[in-house]
Image (tube, helix red, strand yellow):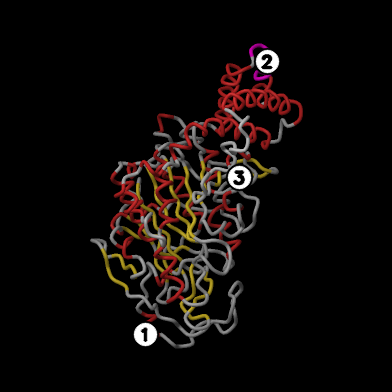
């Protein structure tokens, strides 16, 4: 980057002002493009092979959504209900000893031409199963929320590694100069387990970390616009201040931070903030949506309003060029998420109802707008839950088996891969870890997961570590 920084300084010395700023931005983009091996247009936006997916929306259910109470029908649990068949000793990561076998308190029905079994907690998603492909035997290496959340996002149990969104940003770059490449829409109640760790850029350049947007606030992007009590902060003052700040940052970067990506990330964040002052108000303005759209997403219903608003915002962002959007349901902690230790019958229905209608609306909206042709929609969680009871009718953590579904571009709709055992306790056939899930998503984006690497401390790191295979059974 030294060459680029010197050329930038030269431009400032010669001309400065907006002309210098504009060319400096172009040079910086050129440098990043060379560093990141920008996508070859001949590959349909892909890095290594033709891409079927241009953008991704990931819906993450924090806390461990119960598979046998949502998508993984287990009639054997009805026969074994009440019997003590679980492990005698408490497995690592369980919060209590295993209780008796617990049947689902919810009715299951088959839906669509695919005959997919779905419980009564998801009546809206049940109507869309023929658009989805299910990974029925996902597994985690841990029964603990924090490490499992890291694993599903970065491929590692420990902090410090880049998230999938950061890897995608690094590998493919942005689709728009006016909006962030990787956006995170957390639950209004709070951030997930590990706080901002699941959307970190890790050892990748800091510019690739997720941009957190709190959709429920009056100003979703903090400090994007000046407060009313500062009348001197006009648009002209912004421009002049921005020019000076750019000059100082460029000089400081040359002299002090040649190997520190945080300096360049700050510079680029200021540039993006300036552009977002023009683009963000329109992107976040849901008043432009029709009454029918608001109703479809459940924006008029207190139960679905928060998640519905964020799903709608996710659609607006990908429509306008954001490449990766992550929408979280649930906060870190013992309540307000999918961690249903106390009572599946009482705790699961409210959280399921808060997301079900908005998710189905988002899927239909993407289809109706033609976005399904190059957008991937994902529903997942960090692990599953036990087939035996905890306390009365709660369920404990279980990394043995859980469900993920994908829909949209490149997906063979109405299919499934793998299955858990008769209890839903362990993945039995077609077990898939986060590595396989990540490899499949990257493949759809035109990326070979074995070739997207970053040298860190003498090691060629990748999202899938030394594992992973593309799950071709669910691809069209």
Q: Residue at x 44, y 75 (%)?
A: 346
Rounded to the nearest angstrom, the CA distance separating label 2 from label 3 is: 31 Å
Q: Earlier in the sequence, mark 2 or mark 3?
A: 2
Q: Residue at x 47, y 52 (%)?
A: 327
Q: What is the x, y in percent for residue 259?
A: 71, 33
Rounded to the nearest angstrom, the CA distance separating label 1 from label 2 is: 77 Å
**Label 1–label 3 contact, CB within 8 A:** no
Label for residue 52?
none
Q: What is the x, y in percent for residue 16?
A: 64, 16
| Circle 1: element type | helix
Q: Earlier in the sequence, mark 1 or mark 2?
A: 2
Q: Which residue is mark 3?
A: 201
Q: Which residue is mark 1?
A: 79
Query: Looking at the image, is 192 positioned above or below residue 268?
Result: below
Rounded to the nearest angstrom, the CA distance separating label 1 from label 3 is: 47 Å
Does the segment drawn in magenta span residue 162?
no
User: Looking at the image, is mark 2 or mark 3 nearer the viewer?
Assistant: 2
Could you say which is closer to the camera, residue 332 or residue 253?
Answer: 332
Q: What is the x, y in percent for residue 119?
A: 34, 70
**Label 2–label 3 contact, CB within 8 A:** no
Over which residues does the magenta segment extend?
7-15
Q: What is the x, y in percent for residue 190?
A: 56, 58
Query: Looking at the image, is 319 positioned above or below residue 466?
Result: above
Q: Residue furthest bottom?
A: 83
| Circle 3: element type | loop
Label for residue 10?
2
Q: Earlier in the sequence, mark 1 or mark 3?
A: 1
User: Looking at the image, is mark 1 or mark 2 nearer the viewer?
Assistant: 2
Could you say which is closer to the camera, residue 22 or residue 436?
Answer: 22
Query: Looking at the image, is 394 positioned above or below residue 302?
Result: below
Q: Horizontally, is 10 left or right of 215 in the view?
A: right
Quadrant of the image containing the N terminus: top right
């Amino acid at each position: 980057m030294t060459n680029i920084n010197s050329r930038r300084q030269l431009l400032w010395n010669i001309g400065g002002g907006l002309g210098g700023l504009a060319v400096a931005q172009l040079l910086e983009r050129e440098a990043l493009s060379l560093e990141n091996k920008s996508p070859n247009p001949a590959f349909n936006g892909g890095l290594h092979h033709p891409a079927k997916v241009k953008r991704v929306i990931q819906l993450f259910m924090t806390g461990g959504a119960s598979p046998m109470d949502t998508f993984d029908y287990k009639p054997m649990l009805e026969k074994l209900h009440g019997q003590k068949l679980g492990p005698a000793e408490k497995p690592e990561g369980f919060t209590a000893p295993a209780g008796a076998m617990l049947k689902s308190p919810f009715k299951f029905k088959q839906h669509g031409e695919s005959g997919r079994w779905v419980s009564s907690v998801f009546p809206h998603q049940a109507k869309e199963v023929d658009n989805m492909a299910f990974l029925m035997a996902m597994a985690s290496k841990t029964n603990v929320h924090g490490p499992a959340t890291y694993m599903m996002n970065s491929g590692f149990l420990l902090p410090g590694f880049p998230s999938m969104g950061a890897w995608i940003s690094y590998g493919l770059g942005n689709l728009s100069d006016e909006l962030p490449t990787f956006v995170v829409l957390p639950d209004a109640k709070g951030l997930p387990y590990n706080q901002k760790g699941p959307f970190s850029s890790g050892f990748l350049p800091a510019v690739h970390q997720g941009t957190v947007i709190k959709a429920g606030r009056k100003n979703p992007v903090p400090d994007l616009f000046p407060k009313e009590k500062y009348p001197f902060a006009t648009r002209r003052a912004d421009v002049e201040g921005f020019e000076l700040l750019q000059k100082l940052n460029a000089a400081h970067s040359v002299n002090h931070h040649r190997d520190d990506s945080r300096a360049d990330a700050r510079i680029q964040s200021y540039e993006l903030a300036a552009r977002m002052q023009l683009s963000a108000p329109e992107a976040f303005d849901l008043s432009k949506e029709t009454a029918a759209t608001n109703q479809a997403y459940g924006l008029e219903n207190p139960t679905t309003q928060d998640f519905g608003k964020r799903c709608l915002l996710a659609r607006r962002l990908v429509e306008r060029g954001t490449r990766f959007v992550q929408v979280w349901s649930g906060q870190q902690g013992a309540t307000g998420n999918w961690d249903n230790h106390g009572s599946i019958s009482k705790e699961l229905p409210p959280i399921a109802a808060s997301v079900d209608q908005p998710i189905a609306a988002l899927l239909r909206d993407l289809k109706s707008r033609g976005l399904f042709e190059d957008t991937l929609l994902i529903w997942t969680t960090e692990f599953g839950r036990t087939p035996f009871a905890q306390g009365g009718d709660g369920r404990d953590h279980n990394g043995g088996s859980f469900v993920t579904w994908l829909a949209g571009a490149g997906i063979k709709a109405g299919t499934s891969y793998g299955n858990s055992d008769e209890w839903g306790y362990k993945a039995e056939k077609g077990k898939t870890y986060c590595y396989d899930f990540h490899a499949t998503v990257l493949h759809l984006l035109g990326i070979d997961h074995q070739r997207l690497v970053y040298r860190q401390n003498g090691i060629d790191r990748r999202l899938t570590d030394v594992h992973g295979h593309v799950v071709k059974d669910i691809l069209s």
